[in-house]
Image: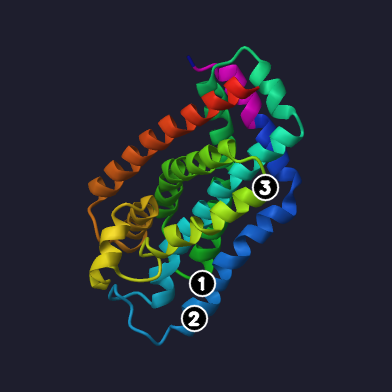
Amino acid sequence: MINFNAVYALLLREAKIFFREKERIISILISPLLFLFVMGKGMAAGTSPVPGYTYQQFIFPGIMAMVILFTSITYGLYIIWDKRLDFLKEVLAAPISRATLFVGKSLGGMLGAIIESLLLVVIGAAFIIPLSPLKVLLCLAAAFPISYMITNVGLSIGATMKSMEGFGLVMSFLTWPLFFFSGALFDLATAAPYIKIISLFDPVTYAVDLLRIIMLGTGYFTVWTDLGAIALFCLATTGLGVTAFGKLQQEK
């Protein structure tokens, strides 16, 4: 049973922490903006896979997925911080279910990803690709399940790690492959067969494709395929995360 009061309290705490770390908001956008304005512009002479759009505009949905990926998955690092500060022990001692704790922390991680996505969409709409208010709203709506899915992965990994160094090592071997195999920087239709096969098991692939359909009107899969795959990954990562947090409670 989910205790919504406890979920709200956990979400409020994570929101306060996020807004206090203003440098974090800016630093996360540095790499995506370099991809957009350096790589995107540097390859502007190349042919875009989507007629009527530049290469910079083509990769913009993928860069938005990149922001969600890096913001959401690195949130698992805060679980390790909570362990060191003994805050997690206090929460685990509270009379709330492991599902309540997991949902509260997951929503807290989503908050940062949604805010970062909003900032990037505003920058993109102003300088890169014209987006109607409806498309902006649809992009933000898509960011919710995508960020939830990726945050769950970060929390699940963070719950099993004992050090920040170990978490960083795992992230370095996970985030970049998830990003590069997603088709964020190229068209999957013309990719090598092995890349296509690997991309089918990459949750970020469907996030990029969904955002590309919203912004550019075309994608490798259908909208329903993307939504179905994201929903499936959300369910799977929720089960994985609740199980990982259950083991945390047993260790308290």
Residue type at mark 1?
Leu
Residue 70 is left or right of residue 212, and the answer is right
Q: CA distance from mark 3 to mark 2?
A: 36 Å
* Mark carried by residue 36: 1
Residue toward you, 26 or 164: 164
Mark closer to the chain start, 3 or 1: 1
Per the image, label 3 sits on a secondary structure element best described as: helix
Q: Position of residue 210 (x, y in %)?
A: 33, 53
Residue toward you, 97 or 57: 97
Q: Which residue, as the protein is rendered here, is positioned at the far bottom? A: 45
Q: Residues within 10 Å of mark 3 (few under 14, many from 20)?
A: some
Q: Residue at x 41, y 30 (%)?
A: 239
* Mark carried by residue 164: 3
Q: CA distance from mark 2 to mark 1?
A: 7 Å
Mark closer to the chain start, 3 or 2: 2
Residue 99 is left or right of residue 45, and the answer is right
Residue where numbered disc 2 is placed:
41
Residue type at mark 3?
Met
Residue type at mark 2?
Lys
Q: Residue at x 24, y 48 (%)?
A: 225
Residue toward you, 192 or 119: 192
* Mark carried by residue 97: none
Q: Please, is residue 20 above or below residue 43 in the view? A: above
Q: Quadrant of residue 87?
A: top right
Per the image, label 1 sits on a secondary structure element best described as: helix
Residue 161 on the magenta span = no
Q: CA distance from mark 3 to mark 1?
A: 30 Å
Q: Which residues are magenta?
A: 2-11
